[in-house]
Image (spheres, rainbow, N blue to C red):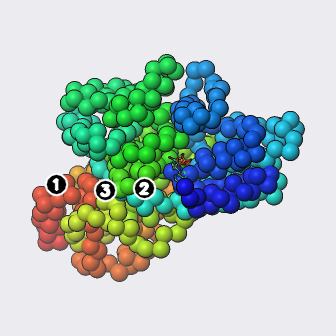
Amino acid sequence: MSFRPYQQEVIEKIIEKMDRLVVMATGSGKSLCYQVPLLVVKKTGIVVSPLISLMQDQVMALKQRGIKAEYLSSAHKDYTIQEWGHDFRVEYKQLDKLRGVLLDVPYAGLTATATEKVRFDITNSLKMNNPYIVVGSFDRPNLFYGVKQFNRGQYFIDELVEEIPKEVANGSTIIYCTTIKDVEQIYKSVMNVGINAGMYHGQMDGKSREESHRLFVRDEKQVMVATIAFGMGIDKPNIRKVIHYGCPKNLESYYQESGRCGRDGIASACWLYYTRSDFSKGDYYAADLKSENQKKTVTESLLEAQRYCLTATCRRKFLLEHFGEKFAADRCGNCDNCTVLRQHRDMSKEAFLLLACIHSCKGRWGLNMSIDILRGSRAKKIMEAQYDKLPLHGLGKAYQANWWKALGHQLISLGYLKEFVTDVYRNVSVSSKGEQFLASCRPDYQPPLVLPLVGELAEEETRSAEEFKILAASESEG
Ligand SMILES: Nc1ncnc2c1ncn2[C@@H]1O[C@H](COP(=O)(O)OP(=O)(O)OP(=O)(O)O)[C@@H](O)[C@H]1O
């Protein structure tokens, strides 16, 4: 066996008793970096893990190789660290106390998703002494990334189940759900079509979870339907598909969970299915949080996950840049946005209306307000602000609200609009690029703005575009 990038140097440094911080992609082989030094120096190591399933997985794999290992876990609760991306886990901050007990023992922090701020927090909180820091690429080139919009209901579940390979030889699949109720429903549907599936969530007792995990790892269950309790650290080489049924709360979780896919390096796919209501769960996620700052962070993180779902540009580039890694090309050629041929259309007129309306609202509202104005709403808040008097009021009736939202999100992802969080509210304003576009427009002329028809923009496109043309013509005649 030869080492993978960084492994040898990291192993050597720990043997030299240097503290280390290792940030390497999912599936890149971080475990070896702390396991091998212990075997070489023949000493016991303490591994602190954030998830019970991760401990089970590691202990199981070590025992299979004849290495003595045990785990101690909290009795009932499955800890997850969704906040990993923005804040270093509070309990982990206490690990520096071990410094006074375990003298002359090197510390190693290993993660797949730490941003620069979190790296600093880790080395600081663990009082790392002149740590050796390794930051590898986050890219997983063999993974295909794709996103689809869905509407809740049995019809969609049947469609989703159809996409699961029926042959065990085709590898296994994980379906991540956002609620236990969804896990149970999808599990039932998968079993109904004769696919041998397992289930894993935090309300199952420890024994059933362990059994379910074991059967999946041994290929006795072909599909695992799970909440994110079955997440980080699951190391099964032949997972060919990771499906997210519902948008995750943040991209750190998404990267970790989708990172279970294709760990043997063979081409595999990560599909994320979102439904629009997923994006309004920010309040729910933030409900238990005390500080305004934490609430804002959760809202912003969900917003970033929403942007990932709605972007029409390269998904890999988007993900990598989220983690602060520059991806030189504009297209990776291995995501839906880079490979699917999409219809395009000149949306200059519609973009002009939306930008002009948002401009009139002066960044004081979210996207929905401008859409309501364009669609001619006479709701109280519109009348109170006298937005019904704007010349744009009602000019966008021909399109559904969701169509306008999809256009708005495209304009955000292309930099014509900026969405930002104030308190916990999401406001939208016109960016300088959008201002430039507006400056080049007149009511009867807009320079071409050709956009791909993604998601809801593609739906009802022909009918609405025709109606819009008729409406626009009658407005200009009148
Ligand atoms: N040098 C190597 N040669 C071959 N296989 C390796 C090597 N290093 C690690 N692996 C294998 O790669 C897989 C992924 O390794 P590991 O579980 O340590 O990844 P990780 O970096 O901890 O990922 P994650 O952050 O996603 O949990 C494992 O199956 C491991 O056995």
- Identify the residue position indicated by label 3 in the image: 406
**Looking at the image, is mark 1 or mark 2 earlier in the sequence?**
2
Q: Quadrant of the N terminus?
A: bottom right
Residue at 29 percent across and 42 percent down: it is 169
Q: Which mark is residue 460?
A: 1
Q: Does the rendering let one see residue 276?
A: no
- Looking at the picture, tell me which residue is in the foreground, 290 or 59: 59
Q: Position of residue 364 (x, y in %)?
A: 48, 56
Q: Quadrant of residue 433?
A: bottom left
Tell me the residue at 16%/62% (across/down): 465
Residue 265, numbered circle: 2
Local SS, label 1 = loop
Give the x, y percent position of residue 365.
Answer: 45, 53
| Residue sitting at x 40%, y 59% | 142
* Residue toward you, 380 or 216: 216
The kind of residue tagged 2 is Gly
User: Which structural element holds mark 2?
Assistant: loop
User: Percent from the top left, x then y, of residue 436?
Assistant: 41, 78
